[in-house]
Image (cartoon, rainbow, N blue to C red):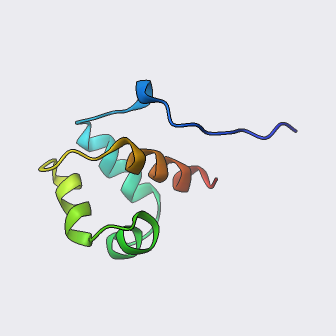
Amino acid sequence: MDRVTLVPQASEYRAGDVQYFRELVLSTGLTRVVLARDYLGVTDRCLRLWMAGDTPFPYSIQFTLECIVLGV
């Protein structure tokens, strides 16, 4: 079986799509605190601001969340 390699693609960046971002966060199955601190390297406050749409989330965070959800 071929191994799938995920590569960040700027064309896949869903900037401003807060609903998509929230769904990714919830789909990880992790608490916000654990996800922010242990997986994303940010504060819980930063994650909350992204989820509220108050601050735009970077593509690197979207990509990381997608990898967590996909289990890669």
Picture coordinates of residue 72, whole percent (x, y): 64, 53
Which residue sits furthest right?
1
Q: Residue at x 11, y 50 (%)?
A: 54
Look at the image and tell me in which quarter the N terminus lies: top right
Residue 3: where, in percent of width, then height?
79, 41
Displayed quadrant of residue 59: top left
Q: Give the farthest residue toward the left.
A: 54
Left or right, 33 with reference to 56: right
Work out whether 34 lies above or below 65: below
User: Residue 30: x, y in percent?
Assistant: 44, 69
Instruction: Please count the marks in the image.
Output: 0
Q: Residue at x 41, y 63 (%)?
A: 40
Could you say where residue 19 lies in the image, as x and y percent from the top left? 27, 42
The residue that appears at 42% across and 24% down in the rendered structure is 11
Q: Residue at x 33, y 70 (%)?
A: 32
Does residue 35 lie above or below 62 as drawn? Answer: below
